[in-house]
Amino acid sequence: MAKIKITQIKSRINAPKVQKLTLDALGIKKMHHSVIKEDTPSVMGMVKRVHHLVEVTKL
């Protein structure tokens, strides 16, 4: 499977609780923190939910 790099680029302060929990599930803890994940449908679904807070790069 392909890998993707997910980086938080906007603050989670005013985000709804569901989006904060999604960021936690992805493993993103704070601004400009990045994680490497497999490009699976479940991960892409989580990214779609918080697409306005993160930046996705294919590796």
Image (cartoon, rainbow, N blue to C red):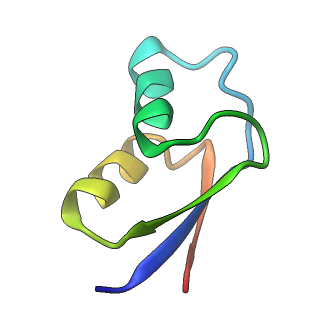
Total marks in image: 0
Residue 15 is situated, as x and y percent measured from the top left of the image, at 57, 20
> Residue at image x 50%, y 49%?
51
Which residue lies most toward the left here? 41
> Looking at the rendering, in which quadrant would you find the N terminus?
bottom left
Residue 57 is situated, as x and y percent measured from the top left of the image, at 59, 75
Left/right of residue 51 with respect to residue 38 in the rendered view: right
In the image, residue 21 above or below residue 6 = above
Quadrant in the picture for residue 53: top right
**In front of the other: 52 or 1:** 1
In the image, residue 55 above or below residue 54 = below
Residue 18 is situated, as x and y percent measured from the top left of the image, at 38, 20
In the image, residue 21 above or below residue 9 = above
> Residue at image x 33%, y 73%?
39
Left/right of residue 10 with respect to residue 44 in the rendered view: right
> Residue at image x 72%, y 48%?
33
Residue 48 is situated, as x and y percent measured from the top left of the image, at 38, 51
> Residue at image x 50%, y 23%?
20
Left/right of residue 27 with respect to residue 44 in the rendered view: right
> Looking at the rendering, in which quadrant would you find the C terminus?
bottom right
